[in-house]
Amino acid sequence: MHTRRLLLLTLPALVIATVFGMGTARADWPDRPVRWVVPFGPGGANDLIARAAAEAVGKRLGQPIVIENKPGAGAIIGADYVAKAKPDGYTWLIGAAGVVTNSILRTDMPYADADLIPVGMIAVAPSVIVVNPSVPANNLKEFVAWAKTQSAGINWATAGGGSTPHFVAEMLRESGVNITIVPYKSGSEGMTAVLANNVHATSEASIVVLPQVKAGKLKAVATTYSRRISSYDTLATAQEQGFAGVLIGHWAGLFAPKGTPPAIVERMSRELEAAVKSGEFRDKMVPSGIEPEPGTTAAFVTFINAERDRLRMLAKKANMQADK
């Protein structure tokens, strides 16, 4: 009887201590540096976006955000690392389109889509369709018309099976263009192939191709983003030119491991949105052709779900496969 009474007296105190202890731990987050994993090598659009956002968000959190590059396997290595990380709010993923498309194109995924929780969109490096200057076309309509006159079709560089350039090529095939896919290891290699006139065309992130376009070494015929690029607004979108189905961008967003406390996810989402809305972040991104895309977690979840459904249908119709 005495033991039972003692337990009844102490249990509420234990519950209160636990609740307050949890609240204190969450209120103190972060109490040490936070890590954002970039599943690509340094220097690309995803890495650049991550570093600019990390600096801005770190100031708001009062702790530095450290970027760790874990490239390989179409971004699967980095994504898998985060999916299996301790969900304590100290390890996050700067995800890209592969977070959506890898599970569509692969049967050997080491993690499930549900293992990564969308937190917020950061920015988009719009995809730009570029051709070698020898191609007699100055816009997408002219390019498609010219391509249809080529008896053997055209050669199109991609950054590998299932990459964004691959999806753009499949979208263009819907217009009746005969396209032969030529896969390369990276978008930079694909662009170099177009520069050397080894292939007719490709699409790549604005930050990769616009310097070559502005130097006159490549011709840009369209952006596949939903609106014109702020720093190159003379380039019409594919949609403006009558190709409604040619729509995709090189986006970057933040993800957390499943099980990360909701209070931490909400705090990170709030600080991320505020940072991406800042003039400081915009001033760093826009001149290089990158568009800030601030938004709520709910908006990002809606985007991810819609993009997964849309691209799954396209991949199935085109029988797309990732590189082995």
Image (cartoon, rainbow, N blue to C red):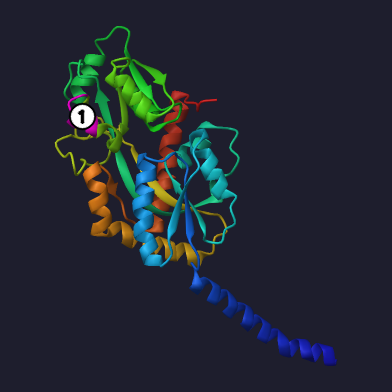
Quadrant (top left, top right, bottom left, bottom right) of the C terminus: top right
Q: Mark 1 highlights which residue? A: 213
Q: Position of residue 192 (x, y in %)?
A: 32, 23
Against 226, residue 32 (above or below) is below
> The disc labelled 1 sits on which kind of residue?
Val
Q: Position of residue 296 (x, y in %)?
A: 37, 58
Q: How many numbered callouts?
A: 1
State yes or no: residue 212 in magenta.
yes
Question: What residue appears at the point 58 percent right and 52 percent down from the top-left corner?
Answer: 85
Q: Is residue 78 left or right of residue 44?
A: right
Q: Is residue 174 left or right of residue 102?
A: left
Quadrant (top left, top right, bottom left, bottom right) of the N terminus: bottom right
Against 239, residue 57 (above or below) is below
Q: Is residue 49 left or right of residue 147?
A: right
Q: Position of residue 298 (x, y in %)?
A: 40, 57
Q: Is residue 137 left or right of residue 101?
A: left
Residue reaching furthest to the left? 234
Please give the range of residues in magenta.
Answer: 211-217
Against 204, residue 304 (above or below) is below
Disc 1 packing (10 Å; few <14; some 14–19; many ≥20) = some
Tell me where residue 268 sits by quadrant. bottom left
Tell me where residue 209 sits by quadrant. top left
Q: Is residue 237 visible?
A: yes
Question: What residue appears at the point 25 percent right and 22 percent down from the top-left corner?
Answer: 131
Decide which of 178, 198 is in the foreground and name it: 198
- Label 1 secondary element: helix
Q: Position of residue 285 (x, y in %)?
A: 27, 48
Residue reaching furthest to the top? 151
State yes or no: residue 49 in magenta.
no
